[in-house]
Each structure stands twice: as C-alpha cells, then as structure tokens.
Image (cartoon, rainbow, N blue to C red):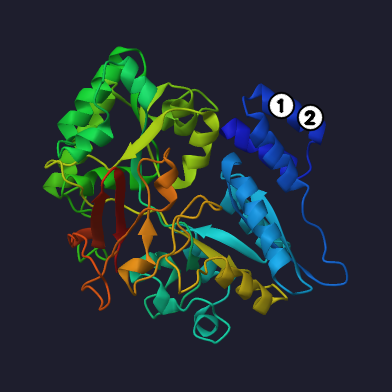
Amino acid sequence: MSTSQQSLIEEFQTGKIGRRTFLRRAMALGLSLSSIEAIMAACTTGGSGGSGSSIKWSNWANTGEIQRFRDFTNNYNKTHNTNVQYTFVPSANANYFTKILTELNGGNAPDVFYAGDGDIGKLVTNKTIIELNASLNSSKAKEKASDFLPGLWGAAKTPSGKIYGVPVDCNPLLLWYNETVLQKAGITTMPAAVYEQGQWTRNAFQEMISKIKATGKYGYVLDSGSINYWAWCTANGGKVYDKNGYGNFIANQDPKSVDALNWLSNQIKQKTLVYAGSLPKGQGSDLALLSGQTGFIAVGRWDLPEFKSAGIKYDCVPFPTPSGKIGPAPVPLAYMVINAKTKLQDQAFDFLTTRFHRSRRHKPRASSQMGMILRMRATCLTLVTLAIASPRRKDLQLGCPMTLGLRSIPSGCKERTSIQHCPDLSLWPIRASRRRNRVFSSLSWM
C-alpha cells in the first residue's frame, strides 16, 4: 500500500473526512472497490456492549487484512459469553507507533494492540504495557509461555525473563515476484523452479534482474528497513552480530557480510536494483510489484491479501545463496501487548491468549481467516505448520508439518525434517518439500 493510500485511510479512521470524500479519493488513488468496502465496513463496525464494558484492540493492517481482522473480532464477540464488547480499530502502517504513543500519553490508547520488535522496548521502559508472566503461567492462559518457540520472544522478553508481549506475526522474509514482469523480460524458468533445481544462486538472481532492467522496469526494489540488508548478509553466509547474535555489530567487518553489502551497492550503481526511498512520492515496493513496475520485492506473507485482490500472477522464493541451497533469513516479529491502564486486564488477556489459541487435538495451520501464521509451538513437529510458497494454490493452507528450531526430535513424531544450525543471528533455516507444495521458512532461535 502506498503512503498516500495509508494517509487517506488514517484520515478516514480518525474522522477527518467523511465517507463520500473517502470513497472519491480512494478510487482516485487506485484502491479496489472490495478494499474500499472492507475499510468502510471496518471503520463503522463496533460500538458498546450495551450495559457491559468495551475493549478496543488495534493493529496495523493493509486493505486486504482489515476485513479478516474485523471478521475475527465479530466471531469472538459471538462465541464468548461475556458482557464485554470487543472492537477492532484498524490503523495504517504509516506512523502507527507514533499514533500509539500519542494515545498512550493522552489516556485513550487501545486496551490491546500490536507493537513491533523495534518499538516494544520503549513501551517496556516507560511502563505503559503490563508484564504477562503471571497471566501466562496461570490457569486462565489458553497458551503457556512454554508453548512458544523461545526465539520468537525477541525484544518482548527481558534478559531477566520478564515477558511483555506475545508474538503474533511470525513469517520469514522472502523474495516475492511478479511472474508477468519476469516473462516479459524473457525469463522462462521461474525462480521457484530454479530453486527446486538447487540452482537459486546470487548469480542466477542477478541475471534475472538484469534482464528485467533491460525492459525498462526495476529488477528489485530494496526497502529501507535494516532487516532487508541483513537478509542478504546471512544468505551469503555472513554474520551481523557476534556472540551468537547478542554481541557487537560486525557486519561492516565480516568478509561475507561486506561482500553482500558491496554487491547490493553495485546493483544500485548498475540500476538493476532501486532503493525504495527513491521511488516516486506515494509509491512503495508493494505498489511497484502490483503495478508491474518491478520484478522482485522482499516482504513477509502479510502482503499476500493485496497480491490476491490485485489479481496478479505471483510466487515467492527464499533469498538466493552462494550454494543454491536455502540459507538463514530473518523473521520480522510483532507482538500483542496490553495497555497498563486498561480497566479490564482479565478480559484483555483472555482476548490476547485466545487470539492465538488452537486446539491441542488438531494440527494448526496457516490461518485462512487471518492470512498469516498466528503462533508457533515447540513441543512437536505436528504442532507447527508453515505454508509460504506457491500461494495461489488452494492447498497452501494445508502446508507440511515440520519441526522448527528443535534441538532434538520429540518422541511420537513420525518424520524428520532437515535442520541446519547457523550460530550467528541464531537462525534455524528449514526447508521441507512434499511434491509440488514447497514450504520455505526460517525462524530465529535464542
């Protein structure tokens, strides 16, 4: 979603513009009718619970996700016998955390909300969110702290073990591509097929983006977040921090990381790669992919709803490596936290823990309702499923069960998936292949 589109949604959500103005400007900015309908419905849904109380929860969401979160909230209200009404308040990704801080300072922040891995530390420091250890260890918790992969806590868990947020969106950074753009550049074998052949190397990727650039399109749009750079370093076998990811920054000294960064710099000079900040105002990498202006971008599965609604031909593939085999890639983390000033802590926690609960009697899967991996468990391979690649096919949501970051295979598991240990950045790269259903993933491990 472009900055202009996000700003427009923010104006509508905060009441600065009316429905008619929003509709006119949204259509002018290229939002689809289905997206406009979902946004307008989400922003007018909610209300009080009659004589009961109300809990607001908020997160950043693109146009494809808003309706799913709204449906989830409506279903939660229907299935829980409580006099508390839960209301979803969507927010554009642009300036999300600034808005949350302003609301926290003003005393009108949501009771439950998302916090990014780069922001939660500030919330812990200023004590605006509650510690969750006691609740997670109590009988009212539908998920215990031990049910989550240790590496997914990240900044939400202090060195002393205090937990302030539950991980929510845990899918690895991948390269997504517009097949039509590649085909028009004369590329006949798609990246996913090249990867399956064990030939997905940096040279193969460079050859593709060079061909795309020759057609007048961007080969690859590199976003500004540091995670996009470290992904290329680790894929190249380099280190970003020493001491197993908890020490000093060394990407500027590690030979393989320096090589990866120099390669990125050279691609910018050759204009096969373009920095997202240099795109025309209001255009982001996702819009460039949707509009056929670039062949590749790097995102997680959160952009999948937009790809689907746009009707483009797309697929995804891991970052290329020197060997052609899958390498470690970073996992962007986000957390659900509870406002320290909420007057309904128990109800807020119930919503937080239910939000990620799945019956222990069933295999969890990539949720068709939420469009993302909701939570990870480390007890058995059948308890974790990631289905990332080949997203157009209907069997995406079934995926393949696999172990994720386990140091040993638990008893009762029927199959073993290949696991490689990458000590720096503490990443566990994993790949499973079952016929045509490719599954790519890598999770950080503490």
Looking at the picture, which amino acid does disc 1 mark? Arg
Give percent across and percent down for residue 217.
37, 17
For the point 58% across and 41% down, which residue is it?
Answer: 64
Picture mark count: 2
Q: Is residue 69 left or right of residue 144?
A: right
Dot 2: what SS?
A: helix
Q: Is residue 120 left or right of residue 209?
A: right
Residue 246 or residue 26, whichever sits in front: 26
Q: Is residue 225 above or below residue 293?
A: below
Dot 1: what SS?
A: helix
Crowd class of label 2 (few under 14; some 14 to 19; many from 20; radius 10 Å): few
Q: Residue 405, can we see it? A: yes
Q: Dot 2 corresponds to which residue?
A: 21
Give percent across and percent down for residue 156.
45, 68
Circles 2 and 1, Cβ within 8 Å, touching? The answer is yes
Tell me the quadrant of the picture where the N terminus can be found.
Answer: top right
Q: Quadrant of residue 320?
A: top left
Q: Dot 1 corresponds to which residue?
A: 25
Q: Residue 57, can we see it? A: no
Give percent across and percent down for residue 267.
24, 27
Looking at the picture, which amino acid does disc 2 mark? Thr
For the point 83% across and 63% down, which residue is it?
Answer: 48
For the point 71% across and 26% down, which residue is it?
Answer: 25
Q: Is residue 96 above or below residue 17?
A: below
The CA distance from mark 2 to mark 1 is: 6 Å
Q: Is residue 55 left or right of residue 413?
A: right
Q: Quadrant of residue 411?
A: bottom left
Tell me the quadrant of the picture where the C terminus can be found.
Answer: bottom left
Q: Which mark is residue 281?
A: none
